Image (cartoon, grey):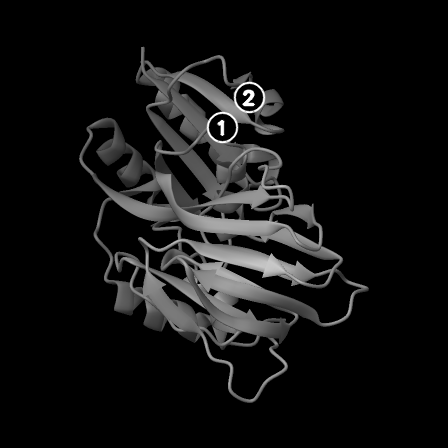
Amino acid sequence: MKKACIYANSDKDTYFSMAGKVAEYLKDAGYEVYCQGEAACAFGGSEITSLQGKLDIAFVLGGDGTVLSALAEGYLYDVPLLCINMGTLGFLMEHDSEDFPKVMDRILNEDYSIVKRQMLSVTIRSTNGEETGPVHYALNDVDVARSSLGGVMRCNVWVGDEMVSEYAADGILVATPTGSTAYSLSAGGPIAEPDVSCLIITPVCAHSLYTRPLVIKDTQTVRIVPKRGPLSLVLDGQREYAIQTGDEIIIQKADVCAKFISTNQRSFFELLRKKMGEWNIPRN
């Protein structure tokens, strides 16, 4: 029996009404349905754990933040994601809720393609050379940032075996091409097409007239060595970990990826025009 998971944002999908419709379609098609979070109680699905084994497909209902939250759970790496937009901007959300019946028919008939998005792996190495904690993953970006009460962060940034520079800034972002339209963009970073093989290093509020973002090959390893704390490691704006002065943050292309289901092969530049246009419209 095929296995599916539903991850719904209750702030977007009120009373999990859309999640319930998706679950009904899947059960009628013979799927075993699992849910993440509160949705499991809403319509009788089993809550997802590491015990149910490999999932065949996952449905994410909400906005871009919902996708990042779902991936943060750790069960959906390399699982095809069907993302239904119930939010506003939605760079990652290809399908709109009003297209639900048509999209579901195509999904159940396996009439779709898979788009892979690069992810980042992050490890923290202490001053004694030991890795502290597990490997972390991020789809959009990794942010090494000063704490809310700290002063300007100072750190050295290395690419491979070569030091790039010493930075004085509020933070250093390392973003994927997917993340280039998120925090990195707001911090002055460039926009990259999602399938470009690169990493983007963007200083946040650097105390310099000459500091600029860098674009490097995705085969490179980035090391960030803070020289002044307290600091935080923030992954996709969702998860935060404390960093000590002298720790090394090691960032590289991950050996897992995010897989998105596509039914219409959207043009990236068409999407960019549409979403950036929406972003510039004032909302009440």
Q: Is residue 184 above or below residue 57?
A: below
Q: Does residue 106 appear left or right of residue 62 in this picture?
A: left
Label 1 neighbour load within 10 Å: few <14, some 14-19, many 20+: some
Give how far apart the Cα atoms at labels 2 and 1 are: 6 Å
Please state the horizontal and vertical placement of residue 122, each as a whole percent of the image: 50, 45
Which quadrant, please, contains the C terminus? Answer: bottom right
The residue closer to the viewer here, 43 or 248, is: 248
Q: Tell me the quadrant of the picture where the N terminus can be found.
A: top left
**Where is residue 263 shown, x and y percent of the image?**
23, 45
Give the mark, 2 or 1, whose residue is nearer the N terminus.
Answer: 1
Coordinates of residue 22 in the picture (x, y in percent): 41, 30
Q: Tell me if residue 29 comes above or below residue 250 in the rendering.
A: above
Q: Is residue 96 visible?
A: no
**CA neighbours of label 2 inside 10 A, class few (<14), some (14 to 19), many (20+):** some
What is the residue that sits farthest to the front in this orientation? 128
Kindly state the secondary structure of the residue where label 2 is placed: loop
* Left or right relative to 159: residue 113: left
Residue at label 2? 43
Q: Are circles 2 and 1 on residues that touch, CB within 8 Å?
A: yes
- Height in image: 252 above or below 283? above
Q: Nearer the viewer, residue 133 or 280?
A: 133
Name the foreground residue: 235 vs 82.
235
| Count of numbered circles on the image | 2
The answer to whether residue 129 of the structure is visible from this angle is yes
Q: Secondary structure at mark 1?
A: helix
Q: Is residue 149 left or right of residue 196?
A: right
Indicate which disc residue 20 carries: 1
Q: Residue 193 at what x, y percent from top left?
A: 29, 64
Dot 2 amino acid type? Phe
Q: Residue at x 27, y 57 (%)?
A: 197
Relative side of 149 to 237, left or right: right
